Amino acid sequence: MAPRVVVVEADGGSRGNPGPAGYGAVVRDPETGEVLAERSESLGTATNNVAEYQGLIAGLRAAAELDATEVDVRMDSKLVVEQMCGRWQIKHPGLRPLAAQAAALVGRFGAVRFTWIPREENRHADALANAAMDAAAGRPAAPASLGAPASASVPAGGASTGSDPATAPASWEPRPSFTATRLILVRHGETAYTEQGRYSGRGDVPLSERGRAQAAATGARVAALAPSVAAVLSSPLSRCTATAAAIADAIGAVPVRTEADLIECDFGQWEGRTFAEVRQQWPGEMDAWLASTRIAPPGGESFTQVAERVRRVVDALPKAYPGETVVVVSHVSPIKLALRDALAATDGFLHRLFLDAAGISVLDLWPDGGIAVRTVNDTAHLPAA
């Protein structure tokens, strides 16, 4: 059997040295870079070096839990790397027990290699450590729990019932569509921020003139797709409620009900900025956010938390509307996360799927947890640009 090799990236630090401390560790597949596990924890008051060693220990434990046989450890702490390689003496008495604990873990693997890397190459672990330090200092931490392991093969936020593809039965057997609850997922029409390519989260940016035309066209398309609709649910933001109202008018006599859990991701300090502006001002935070759904923008929320609330809505709808059609009007992030879960895809799916303004996607959900994705980002109904 071929040895399983993993990469461990670890970091730790404190605010004050000693001060509020924490660590972060990431385990990756060396070939694909896929994140196999994350670890993070606040340590109370400690020094930078203690936190760095704790990050290393947590990373090695995570690698052992994944049954790794060889580990490439990469850290931006020169001290820890040199001490673990035996080239530097461990003079501080407080570090000796930690170094011994790390050495005992090293002995559990066939081979462990230590490499120093620049801090900019260790941004993911650094971001986890900083979130833990913020928590130790009593500051608001990232909304998601960063201490739990993450697996790219499991939807972020843990398993759920109903729409969870991990628990859904696998079968090629045709299913009668009339027994399914059909979700027609609609992204809102265009806004000024859509056209300008700006992050548009909790800000209540209204539909543009073009967006209103898209909403009307989407209403006609939904009416053709679903002559009978049991409910129209919408994010509370006006760009969604206006789109939902146009759809409700087209299908007739169905009130629009707002659902708070369908609101867009909170992009925090990135709200209203372009990708280029964010990349220039927050390069490290941007890299960490793109690398993990568990990392939030500064002052915002992570995709892990968005996925948890979206999953609550999706799981509840088949119970509330068995065998009926429900229109759900929301935003890019919630719809992408719902489709990721439905397709049992990894987090990489989120960066590869493009959803147009007023695009339509269709899911069928059966009472036993079966799922069929019938349409993704249908835009044939939209007026030409």
Image (cartoon, rainbow, N blue to C red):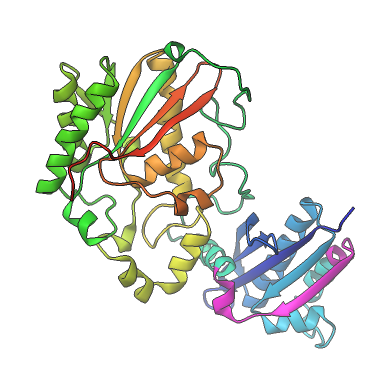
Estimate the x, y position of residue 268 in percent, counting from the top left: 33, 58
Is residue 106 found left or right of 121 in the rendered image? right
Estimate the x, y position of residue 375 in percent, counting from the top left: 40, 33
User: Can you name the residue that lies furthest to the bottom here?
Assistant: 88
Residue 60 drawn in magenta: no
Residue at x 36% of width, y 14% of height:
324
Residue 201 position (above or below residue 187): below
In this view of the protein, which residue sits in the foreground, 176 or 240?
A: 176
Residue 121 drawn in magenta: yes
Residue at x 58% of width, y 76% of height:
121
In this view of the protein, which residue sits in the foreground, 237 or 224?
A: 224
Is residue 63 found left or right of 37 in the rendered image? right
Residue at x 37% of width, y 26% of height:
183
Estimate the x, y position of residue 118 in percent, counting from the top left: 60, 82
In this view of the protein, which residue sits in the foreground, 364 or 280?
A: 364
Is residue 247 found left or right of 263 in the rendered image? left
Residue 180 position (above or below residue 269): above
| Residue 37 seen in the figure | no
Estimate the x, y position of residue 114 in percent, counting from the top left: 77, 76
Q: Quadrant of residue 264?
A: top left
In this view of the protein, which residue sits in the foreground, 50 or 255?
A: 255
> How many labels were placed on the picture?
0
Is residue 310 found left or right of 97 in the rendered image? left
| Residue 53 seen in the figure | yes
Query: Which stretch is magenta?
Result: 103-123
Residue at x 17% of width, y 34% of height:
217
